[in-house]
Image: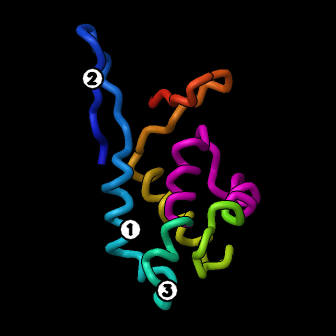
Amino acid sequence: MNAKLFYGEQSTVVEAVNMDDEIAHWMRHYRNYVPRFRSDDYLPALKLGLDAYLRGHGQDFDDMADNLQLSYVRVRGNSRLDWNEALPVAMAAWTRLSERGAPQALVDQESRFGFATIR
């Protein structure tokens, strides 16, 4: 799950979530949630849950749910899942990372480049 990145001669090991592996895992198991839809319908909810964990700064999923619902409306695209169907998918993706102790991004609010530091 975690990739290790090394920087410079006196490098620090930074662990990061391998998003391709996470998405591949969920694409193999997506039918466990709302089986009547295609994998493309699940992708926006899946990515939302993964992103919520990585950027959540330790918040509980339930504390973010209202904001995630608003975000889902923006990122949903052509997905046929409404929020009530997308919610368990997003929560499952968030929970998987949480239970595995995946690192979360510490996003510098003043970062001009949008880089995140992984802890």
* CA separation in Å, label 1 and label 2: 28 Å
For disc 1, the marked residue is 26
Residue 102 is situated, as x and y percent measured from the top left of the image, at: 41, 44
Name the residue located 37 percent from the left edge and 71 percent from the top edge: 27
Q: Which tag, 3 or 1, sits closer to the chain's start?
A: 1
- Amino acid type for the residue under numbered disc 3: Phe
* CA separation in Å, label 3 and label 1: 14 Å
Task: Magenta stretch: give its range.
Answer: 45-71
The 10 Å Cα crowd at callout 1, few under 14, some 14 to 19, many 20 or more, is some
Tell me the quarter of the image containing the C terminus. Answer: top left
- The disc label shown at residue 6, or none: 2
* CA separation in Å, label 3 and label 2: 40 Å
Q: Quadrant of residue 111?
A: top right
Instruction: Specify whether residue 48 is painted magenta.
Output: yes
* Residue placed furthest toward the top: 10
Residue 71 is situated, as x and y percent measured from the top left of the image, at: 69, 58
